[in-house]
Amino acid sequence: MKKNLFLIAVAALTSAVLAEAGGWEFTEVTVVQRWPWSRKVDIDFRARQTDGQASRRRAARVAVKLGDRTLAADQLQGASILGEGRHRVVWTPPEDGSFPTEIKNATFMVSLVDDVPDVGYMTVDLASGAIDYKPLAFSNEVNVATYKTTHMAFRYIPSTQSGEWRVQKGKTTFRIGSDGKRTDLGITDGDRGREGVANIALTKAFFLGVFPMTRRQYALLGGSVGTQDAVPVRNVSYDALRGRDGTNDLGLCCFPATPNIGLDTPIGRLRLRTGRNFDFPTEAQWEYAARAGSEEEYFAAAATSDAAVALLNEYGAYNAGAAVGTKKPNAWGLYDLVGCCHQWTTTSPVLGANGGPAKHADGVDPLGPVPQMGAGPFRVCRGSHSGPGGAKARVGRLAYRMLQRSNCENGTLNGATYNAEPSNTGCRLALTLDVK
């Protein structure tokens, strides 16, 4: 049976009022209640900055009034917005009788509560899904227990089309991969075959997790884990975190052939709670954010292999029992990119003429190919794990790629055998934006 939507009266705010409240204007307010199959109310509006300081790096937190009553913040989803354009706040009316079950002919008003003019971070309350935006100065506050356990923190990463990247680098691409010339670092022929240098453009900004996902965060997103603390979660497969790739031609959740994701997974639950399409980063996003403008093998130049190991010890904990955030962040404030765990990406390896993984190719927003299916397709992991021993200088490089089957089992790819390392495999999450 077709369900009918009840349209509710629209109220628009005047720019004169909003100009006195942080330079934001909210207009074109439309409201739809999902009744009768849901109590939720969708409040859509257009946001515009009126003070001449329009920037896609600017965020606002809004309040919503129904008549003369301000709706409780914990009843609203999406009340923190990033950038201009159309936005939606979802209101869940309480069931205590304070509001009628079916809301008709009501007047809603959207107004500014807070303004963040230099967005550098986004935080997510894992229990409620509430999102908030923080300024760049939040880098001094992010490395605390809260954002390693009950909340997640994400760093804003500008696209290569953004003014700040062009000013820094003088171009709209970045270099991915390694030329493999540092023979003293233990680079193998296989590495050289997988890591060839390419120029990549990323046209969309994104948020990337400040830390890898921890055991506590994994548990709050429905994952099964013993100790719940700020140690990175490991031994988690791509399929378990995102949804099973499957064994047929396209799979059930086979990125990029289909946007589907398993709703009964940690990432699926995070999407449902927040209303945002969180995912793993692509490997191009991971390496771009990890390099933070560097074209060295590591976070800085290291003339010898001993210097490389010393440098890696500054940035990687290399201790399986260490909590995240115990060592230095990279230049963009991201911790534990190396020396922690292999980190899943959505990217499947391109196969070369010899059947093995091919080198990188120049590209724009590369997503990777549809993977070969079979019994668990391969995905690319980035970052190095906590116990590489004498291979630290090799696997700690920012270009290092590890192939892992999505189900974390041993397997072959066109005749080449790849041994799974589930005990070393974790993740960090990303949110791609429709802005530069």
Image (tube, rainbow, N blue to C red):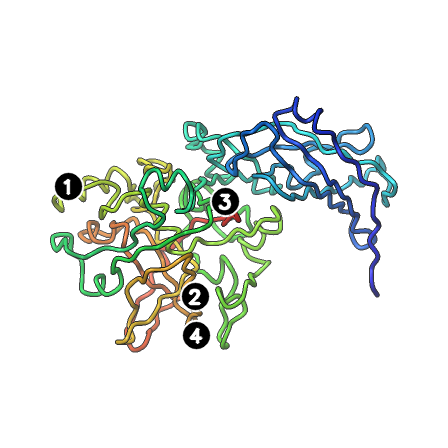
Asked if residue 43 lies left or right of residue 122, the reply is right
Q: Which residue is pictured at 44% across the width and 51% down the height?
A: 203
Assign a secondary structure to mark 3: helix
Residue behind mark 4 = 375
Residue behind mark 3 = 217
Which of the marked residues, 3 or 1, is nearer the chain's N terminus? 3
Amino acid carrying mark 2 in the image: Asn
Height in image: 73 above or below 422?
A: above
Asked if residue 126 lies left or right of residue 436, the reply is right
Height in image: 357 above or below 422?
A: below
> Which one is nearer the viewer's eye here, 430 or 387?
430
Residue 239: horizontal and vertical position, in percent?
48, 63
Amino acid carrying mark 4 in the image: Ala
Amino acid carrying mark 1 in the image: Ala
Residue 407 numbered mark, or none? 2
Amino acid carrying mark 3 in the image: Gln
* C-alpha gap between disc 3 and disc 4: 29 Å
Dot 2: few (<14), some (14–19), or many (≥20) neighbours within 10 Å?
many
Which of the marked residues, 4 or 1, is nearer the chain's N terminus? 1
Image marks 2 and 4: residues in contact by CB distance under 8 Å: yes
Residue 388: horizontal and vertical position, in percent?
24, 52
